[in-house]
Image: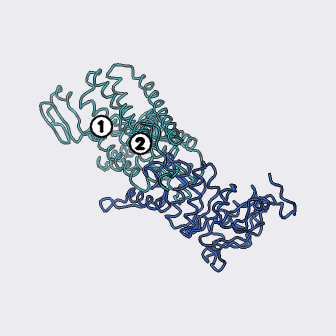
Amino acid sequence: MSKEIKPILTARGVSKHFGGLTAVDEVDFEIYPGEVVALLGDNGAGKSTLIKCISGVYRPEQGRVVFNDVDITHQPPADVRSRGIETIYQDLSLAENLDVGANVFLGKEKTRRLFGLIPVTDDNYMREEASGVLDELDIHIPSLKQKLVNLSGGQRQAVAIARAMYWNAQLVIMDEPTAALGVPEQRKVLALIRSLREQNIPVILISHTMHDVMAVADRMVIMRRGRVVANMTRAEATEELIVRHIVGSVENGESAVMI
Amino acid sequence: MAANNPLVRAQRIPFINARSIEVLTKSWSYLFLLGLVVYFSLVGTGFFSVRNFSSILTTSTLIMLMSIGQTYVVITAGIDLSIGWTVGLSSVTTARVMRDLADSGNDIAYAMLIGTMAGLLVALIPGLVNGVLVARIKVPPFIATLGMFGIVRGAAFLLTDGQQVVRGLSSELREALRMIGNGSLLYYIPDDGFHWFSLPPDLAPQQLRVVSQLLPYPVIITALVVIIFAFILARTKFGRHTYVIGGSEEAARRSGINVDRHLLIIYIICGFTAGIAGVLHLFRFTAGAPQAGEAALLSSVAAVVIGGTNLFGGEGDIMGAVVGSLIIAVLQTGLVILNIDSIWQFIVVGVVIIIAVLVNQLKAALESLQTNA
């Protein structure tokens, strides 16, 4: 990714403490339009905390987060979302008792006036719009009238991504999107991440699955004990190198011991 | 790509697909109601008559009105145990206000209007308190409404000074109440014909015995309430958000729905439909009674569950509650006509509730079977 283009999101010197524990320690992070950045690290490395500092769930004590030239550092999550940063958690943001259309429009239902008077939900419109955005993402769901509970995990994940796209997300954050999915479904989610990139929508991907990371990420940012310890492009990265950074054997100068 | 897309899942198990599960689990209560009606009509003398059907409908209104509000609450994965006494509180309040206004020389119609409004308004209070406890203070609905169960019960009895009914309603007032509570928009007398609003004054006793009420006022009022709240739940944004909260409160919050305010309104609606039931109870029986809705509470929950509304939230509709209420009313009447001790109704209703829950579980099992196919 060429550095002449301005990053869409920049975090500078972000720190977050929980009591005596420094979860995120003066982290710099940036992502450019159309870029897929994998955020890697062991459990407790600070990946999720950093993401939550960006999405507004946590307020960092130090540092700034700038998105599209706007300082969003201490904005509440709803405001961050409305600026176009969509965080997709496994299943948590879907109503599985409702159909695809209802989920794409969750909380922002389209209404029409019955007899020109009473506002009612326009289910056909929502279903058609949902169908359109699913087509764009090349996702095929047999019946859009099905409740989500009848869909597979990957299809549900696809619905969450479709919703982000429909509402013009400008940055998508995905936390372990392929966890709990079967192999074919994992492939489909990776394909979705690629199609977001094709639409110039950047993705921050938190994943423990090395295979996913190597398959889709343009850049890898590796965290360890709250700090960014490595930032490399796909071309520079090897699985071995990544693992060495994750376990810390690079900074300690040890030779890599792979298991 | 589309052809071998792994997400395209063929529904491999014949007859077990989402549609057929939906149809089967949704329509069993309708079929059960139909079966009951057919059975009682075949074996019970006098069951199959317009007169009896109209009486069953009138009987069902109390439970039905309570089950409308209860449906909203249960869809959000809550429950309101207090509405039985809200019915009583509303009935007692209405009776007292009407009595006192009529006694102090006001016009009967005016007294009735103000009394009705007072009865409806007072029913909003327990709903409001339940809503605040559940939505803002995060008290589990079972506990919050159990507390209100006691409080509202006490309040209702305080208003009658511990008596079983509000005393001192003038015969003039009772007659006026009865005209609406036991009246009908349209009557039918065999060999005589249809009459609007009231019966001809000079009816022979044998004619009075065969009069059918085609459109009893309590049924008309209840039907209107059913239509309004069924419409709100099925077609409006408010109704949709109710299902979202029931499906996933987390998702509702993330999508920007004001969950706390929504729950508050839903508990108020539940109090309100119980209030209508209380006012209507007074009109029908002309005695403000604290325990007017006591026995109907569990029946209203039963009606909701029998109608397919999921006690864990997210699923259900008002028509289900209507069918559930009718099943209970048909059982009550049918068993009496068959001369079976009415105590059996409790046992039969209990069995039907368990069937309803089993059907719901079967549905969940079939759905997971299908998804994993």
**Labels 2 and 1 share a subunit:** yes
Which of the two residues, B179 or B232, is positioned nearer the viewer here? B232
Q: Residue A131 in the image: x percent, y percent?
A: 43, 58
Q: Residue at x 68, y 55 (%)?
A: A209
Q: Which residue is mark 1?
A: B171
Spot the blue chain and give its letter. Answer: A
Quadrant housing residue A42:
bottom right
Disc 1 is attached to a residue of which chain? B
Q: Position of residue B135 (x, y in %)?
A: 55, 51
Q: Amino acid at mark 2?
A: Arg
**Whole-percent x and y of residue B7?**
51, 50
Is residue A204 visible to us here?
A: yes
2 and 1 marks in contact (CB < 8 Å): no
Secondary structure category for the residue under label 2: helix
User: Does A162 sit left or right of B100 as displayed?
Assistant: right
Residue at 67%, 63% in the rendered image: A38
Nearest the camera: B41 or B15?
A: B15
Which residue is at the front of the view, B213 or B75?
B75
> Is residue B285 left or right of B89 when viewed as pictured?
left
- Which residue matches tag 2? B19
Q: Circle 2 marks a residue in which chain?
A: B
